[in-house]
Amino acid sequence: MPARSPLTRSRRALGGLLTLALVATPVAATTGAAHAGTAATSSPAAVDLGATVTTGKTTKKSKGKGRAAKVWSPRKEQYADTVTLTDLEIPMSDRVILRGDLTLPADADGDPVDKRFPVVVTITAYNKSVLANSGLGGSDGGYLVKRGYAQLTVDARGTGSSNGQWNAFDTRENTDAGEIMEWAASQEWSNGKTAMTGPSYMGISQLWAAAAQPKGLKAIFPQVPGADVYRDVVASGGAIDVGFIPLWLGLVTTTGLIPPAVGASEPQSALSIYLDHIMGAFGFTAQVIPAALLAQEPAYDGEFYEQRSVINVIDQVEVPAFFVSGEYDLFQRGTPLLFEALQRNGVPTKLITGPWDHLEGSSAADIGDAGYGTLEELQLRWFDHYVKGKRDKRLHKDIADLTYYEQGSGRWTRSKRWIDRDLRARSYHLSGSSTTALVNGSLTTGTPEAGTADVLPVPVSGACTRSANQWTAGILNAGASQFPFPNPCFDDTRINDLTGVVFETEPMERATAFRGPINARLYTSVAGAGDGMLSVSVEDVAPDGTVSRLTGGWQVLSLAETDRRRSRKLNGKIIQPWHPFTEESQAPLEGIEPVDVEVFPTAAKIRKGHRLRVAVQAFDVPHLLPTLPVLLGSLSVITVHTGPETPSELTVPWVRKKRR
C-alpha cells in the first residue's frame, strides 16, 4: 500500500474518529439553524497530463513535437463568496416534507447573486448539518458554487431535518430521489439543469435518481457506490456482515436522533420530525440485523434486497457517470459492475479505482495520484462539459475510461474496459496437501498432485488482516494512522495465514498480472452434517516472506448452489460465480462437492521472484458471522481436496503481454 502524506493521514483519521464518535456516543447537540459564509477553496496547480503515465507495461510521455502538450487547467472562481439557506421544504408526492440546505454564489458582501444556476444535489442519510462539518460528504461544495453552480444538500426521508421514517433505499425513498431532482430543476434559483455528487450512500442515491430519468438531470459523479446490496456488503457469500452493517445502521440512527436544525424556528415541525425518527429507529434499524442472524428474510436474497439494489435499474440510467472506486472498499465488487453496465449501454462513463478503503474512497483525498487532478477539479471538468455545455474536446482523450492502481507494481494503468480483450482465463491448480501452520501446498498450472487440507474452525481468523479494516469501512486504518508505527496486520498477513491452509506457487520466473473478478473452485467436504464457510484470500508473497493480501472472497457451504447461466465466464471458465442465496437453494453439502467462491475483483501484478498464494480459513472476523441456526455446524472441520480427480483451482483474468 503506498505511503500517505501526513495531511491525508490526518483527514482519514478525523473522518474515522468522527464516525466512531457518531456510532458509539449519544449526540445531544444541534449545529444551529442557519449558516452562511465562505467555503474554503484552494485550487492546486493544474495536473500535467504530459507527465509519465503507465499503459500496460510501457511507460511513455505525451507527444508534444517540441512543444509542451496542451494541459487542461481548472477555471478561476467567478464569485467571491457563498451563502447558505437552510431547511428549504421539499414536498414529496405522498405529502411528506423533506428538507435541504441550499448554497448559492454570493458577492463580496455575502449577498446571493441574482441569477439562475445549474444545481448540484447531494442526498444524504447522515444529517446534512453534521455532513457539512465532517468531510464525510466527499468534495467541497464551495469549489463548484464559486464557479457558477448552486449546491443543494437534502436529508433523506426519516433522517436529519426531513420527515418520515427511514427504511434504507426502500421503494419510497428511491422514488423520493427522482422527485427531489425534479423539484430542484424547477426552482427560481435553478436554470433547469442539475447534477449530483457524493460518496457511498450519497453515490447510490445518485443512481436511483438517475434511473427515474428526472427532467434536467445531466450528469452524476458517484464515489464508492454499491450495486447489489446482498452480495456486495450485507451477506457476502451468504454470511451476515456484523462488521460494517451495525456501524452503518448506528451512524444513520444516531445522526437521525440529533434534534432537527429546524427546531429553533419551527418547534412543532421539529417534534413531528423527531417522533418520526424515533419510530424509525425502533423499526427498520432495530430489526434488520437480528432478523438476518435468526435466518429470517434479510438472511437470504429476495424482494427485500431487490428493491434496494440499484444494479436492478442500472439500465434505466442514461446520464454520463464518473465513478470512483476503492480496491479495499466495501463496494469493491459493486462499483465496477455499475461502470460496466453503463459502458455496455453506450452511456459516457469513467472509473478511477485506487488503493483505498471506504473512508479514503469517500474523501478521494488521494485521487490526484491517478494523474487527472483533485476530486473538485474532476467534478468541475465533468459538469462543465455535460451540465454547463462548455465543450471540452480533450476530456475523453485526457481521461481514460478506466484508470486503475495495480497492486504489486504500484503503477496507475489506463485501459478501455474492466474485462477487455487483453485478458485470458488462467487456472492455478491446488496441489498436494496442506496442514494448518505447518505445511504449505502448491499452486501449479501443470498437473496437480492429490492431497487434502483440513480447514479448522478458528474463530479469530481474519482479525489480523486488511479485511478487518475493509469491512469496518476503514475506521481501523484511520485510528492506526494516529500512531507513530504502522499496524503490521494491514501490511503482512502471514500471522493470519497460520490459522488456515495455504497453497502457493514457486517464485515467479516472470511477472504475471491479472485484472477483474476471480473464482476459487474448491472441492470440499465437511465432517458429519455440519456447515461452515470458506474464506479465501488471494495474496502476494515477497522474497523476504512478507504476505500482502490482494483480495478475498467468502462462501457458506450450504448456500453454494451456482447458477452457471448467470455466472461470468472468460474463455469458457467461470471467473465470477453467481449464487442464488435463497432459502430454497440452501442445502447441506454431501460428500465431496465443488464449491465456487466468488473472490472480489482487483488488479495486481505478482512480480518476478514473488509467489502467488491462496489461503483458506473458516472464519473472517470481525467481518462475517453465520446465522444462528447454522452456528454450531460452522464449527465443523472442512476438508479441501486436490488432485486430478478433485481439481480445486484458482482462476484469474490474466493480462496477456502485448506483442512488440
Image (cartoon, helix red, strand yellow):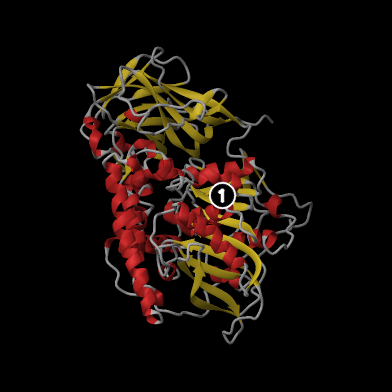
Q: Quadrant of residue 611?
A: top left
In the displayed structure, 141 sits above or below 582; it is below
In this rendering, position of residue 161 left or right of residue 239? right
Q: Which residue is mark 1?
A: 352
Looking at the picture, tell me which residue is in the foreground, 162 or 421.
Answer: 162
Name of the residue lying farthest toward the left: 632
Of all residues, the one furthest to the bottom in this rendering is: 109
Q: Is any atom of residue 484 visible in this view?
A: no
Vertical order, 590 against 462 (above or below): above
Q: Please name whichever residue, 23 or 135, is drawn nearer the observer in this view of the structure.
A: 23
Report the side of 366 relative to 542 (left or right). Answer: right
SS assignment at label 1: strand
* 96 relative to 20 in the view: left or right: right
Residue located 62% across and 63% down the image = 194
> Is residue 492 or residue 168 the one in the foreground?
168
Residue under the image location 67 percent in, 44 percent down? 346
Q: Please identify the quarter of the rendering in which residue 247 is found.
A: bottom left
Judge whether 161 appears above or below 311 on screen: below
The answer to whether residue 66 of the structure is visible from this angle is yes
Q: Quadrant of residue 404?
A: top right
Q: Quadrant of the C terminus?
A: top right
Residue 33: percent from the left, percent from the top?
A: 42, 79
Residue 74 percent coordinates (x, y): 65, 65
Between 341 and 416, which is closer to the camera in this rendering? 341
Residue 465: x %, y % from top left: 33, 43
Mark 1 surroundings: few (<14), some (14-19) or many (≥20) residues within 10 A: many
Residue 296: x and y, percent? 30, 41
